[in-house]
């Protein structure tokens, strides 16, 4: 989908830009600098990619042969030679993220991997000419290759079907939450023939691997939606010369959302959606997100966080690209989790990561900085971020007059960055810089009747809505006069009378006593840190596509 409100109007070009590059104009509109294609260079070729991360899982009896069927979006240009790597290591999610210390206790054993073409054909991804491969536990990467008989059209949605197994009792690591609304599946059985039969029939996902009660859940191991194994990144040969981003990132980039709210190309979050817009002037921007939730600048590209760099990026650079990076510039979004009461300490954690990148890849590496968005609280909490007047910001996170403002000023003035995108105004409510838009700005209508039986004791899992809301929406309702709470919608069923019954996430099944016909709104924030779907769409839709001019040296 195209985020709402995207501006496609060209903006003025600064004098340095005029001196350093030739700009074309068409009908008075700013046009990007010429793209110089390289038919031999491998660049990122999949939206919605994730590193293996978070926690290990255990192969259970009768479920130790598995298959993930995942779909990705191809770049804005034709491709047909794909490089598909599978890791034997995983990343810490939270805590010491992005350290690569969450690892399986045995090699990741690949039985067969297939490229699923949108025309219905299937092509084997081979490892040194072999169908099967092993990614060595904690250290290794298995590199798969596939050449299609003809170019995959630009901006296609294609699949990767990964069969893998392990001994019962061994652990494995995954990175993907199955997105049912996009046709993704996750199967498991006790032998390869049985799991291949499930895949051949495109059967429903195995209940143990994608249980209804845990769909869309991001809690701890016992409540989270199980993670499926799949490729950590996908590259394709035949780049058309457009800018390609390597993003130093944390959860504010694209992992704020849940499985059901991903767009048709698997994009989630503000930056993933913004970069993937195929703007008529600036195009879309292929990208690699290096981080994950909890990532800190001080941990990245440092002790226990080097395998993605040594075993992935630099292998593509040196083995497949003849010494050329699989990216053209760096976006530094990271830094939120390095927060410190001393602004200089906070900023210097972020700057030190940029210095490490430039030490590794050259002082002339083109780096675009991004400022850090505030964290807010709902005061009182039973207002659930409903109105602007009940949004509070402590000094540390104040982007107008607090520590965060000083940090962001340091980011905007640092010579480490060729340019900076100031995210704060795009993220903010127009009524108050540094505070997010609130649900009061996004009314839906009213809940139909009331969910549950209003005894405040019996739990309920469904709510009748007056219209079809987007899957993955977090809806807020005034459950009693002046009191607000929210739920995330993981499934919808049409009732035939214009109303829809929404099923809420399994970890949100509570006994809340809801008044009749409660006023209903879209949530824009989840916890004061992470945006809900409509907050993400709000921010992504406000970032002008002309900000992409900063991606050019």
Image (tube, rainbow, N blue to C red):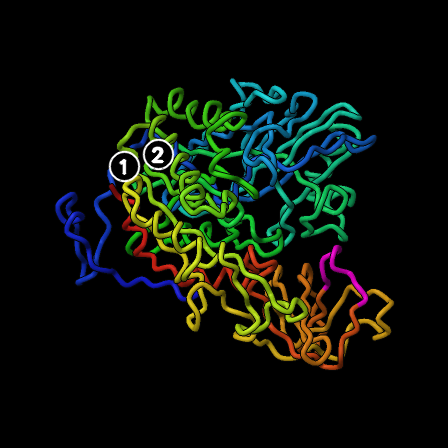
Q: Nearer the viewer, residue 446 or 351?
A: 351
Residue 127 % position (x, y):
54, 21
Numbered range of the magenta stretch: 503-511
x 15%, y 46%: residue:
22
Label 1: state its secondary structure: loop
Disc 2 is placed on an element classified as strand
Q: Position of residue 413 (x, y in %)?
A: 29, 48
- Determine the residue located farthest toward the front in the rendered image: 342
Q: Residues within 10 Å of mark 1 (few under 14, many from 20)?
A: few
505 to 233, vertically: above or below: below
Q: Is residue 128 above or below residue 515?
A: above
* Left or right side of 457 for 318: left
The residue nearer to you, when weighing 108 against 155, is: 108
Q: Which residue is mark 1?
A: 37
In the image, taking residue 284 as reference, residue 228 lies left or right, namely: right
Report which residue position mark 2 lands on: 238
Residue 364 position, x and y percent, is 26, 32
């Amino acid at each position: 989908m195209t985020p709402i409100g995207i501006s496609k109007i060209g903006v003025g070009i600064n004098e340095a830009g005029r001196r350093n590059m030739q700009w074309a104009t068409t009908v008075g509109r700013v046009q990007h600098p010429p793209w110089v294609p390289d038919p031999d260079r491998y660049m990122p070729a999949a939206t919605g990619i994730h590193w293996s991360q978070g926690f290990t899982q255990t192969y259970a009896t009768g479920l130790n042969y598995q298959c993930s069927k995942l779909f990705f979006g191809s770049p804005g240009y034709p491709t047909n030679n794909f490089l598909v790597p599978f890791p034997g290591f995983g990343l810490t999610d939270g805590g010491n993220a992005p350290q690569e210390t969450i690892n399986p206790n045995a090699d990741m054993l690949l039985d067969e991997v297939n490229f699923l073409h949108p025309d219905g054909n299937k092509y084997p991804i081979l490892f040194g000419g072999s169908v099967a491969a092993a990614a060595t536990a904690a250290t290794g990467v298995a590199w798969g290759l596939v050449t299609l008989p003809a170019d995959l059209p630009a901006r296609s949605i294609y699949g990767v079907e990964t069969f893998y197994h392990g001994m019962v009792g061994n652990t494995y690591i995954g990175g993907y939450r199955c997105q049912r609304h996009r046709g993704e599946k996750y199967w498991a059985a006790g032998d390869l023939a049985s799991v291949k039969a499930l895949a051949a029939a495109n059967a429903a996902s195995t209940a143990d691997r994608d249980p209804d009660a845990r769909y869309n859940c991001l809690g701890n191991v016992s409540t989270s939606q199980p993670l499926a194994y799949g490729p950590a990144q996908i590259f394709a040969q035949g780049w058309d010369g457009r800018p390609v981003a390597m993003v130093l990132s944390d959860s504010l980039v694209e992992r704020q959302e849940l499985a059901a709210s991903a767009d048709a190309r698997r994009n989630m979050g503000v930056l993933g959606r913004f970069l993937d817009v195929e703007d008529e002037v600036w195009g879309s921007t292929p990208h690699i997100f290096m981080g994950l939730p909890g990532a800190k600048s001080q941990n990245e590209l440092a002790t226990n966080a080097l395998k993605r760099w040594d075993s992935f990026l630099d292998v593509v650079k040196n083995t497949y690209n003849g010494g050329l990076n699989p990216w053209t510039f760096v976006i530094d979004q990271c830094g939120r989790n390095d927060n410190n009461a001393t602004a200089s300490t906070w900023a210097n954690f972020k700057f030190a990561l940029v210095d490490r990148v430039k030490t590794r890849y050259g002082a002339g590496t083109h780096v675009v900085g991004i400022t850090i968005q505030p964290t807010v609280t709902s005061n009182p909490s039973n207002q659930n971020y409903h109105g602007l007047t009940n949004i509070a910001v402590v000094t540390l996170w104040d982007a107008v007059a607090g520590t965060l403002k000083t940090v962001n000023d340091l980011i905007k003035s640092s010579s480490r960055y060729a340019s900076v995108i100031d995210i704060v105004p795009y993220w903010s409510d127009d009524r108050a810089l540094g505070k997010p838009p609130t649900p009061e700005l996004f009314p839906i209508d009213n809940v139909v009747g009331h969910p549950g039986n209003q005894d405040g004791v019996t739990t309920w899992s469904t709510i009748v809505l007056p219209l079809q809301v987007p899957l993955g929406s977090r809806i807020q309702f005034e459950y009693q006069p002046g009191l607000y709470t929210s739920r995330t919608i993981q499934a919808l069923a049409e009732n035939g009378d214009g109303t829809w019954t929404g099923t809420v996430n399994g970890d949100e099944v509570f006994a809340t006593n809801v008044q009749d016909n409660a006023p209903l709104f879209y949530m824009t924030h989840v916890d004061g840190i992470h945006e809900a779907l409509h907050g993400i769409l709000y921010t992504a839709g406000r970032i002008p596509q002309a900000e992409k001019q900063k991606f050019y040296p």
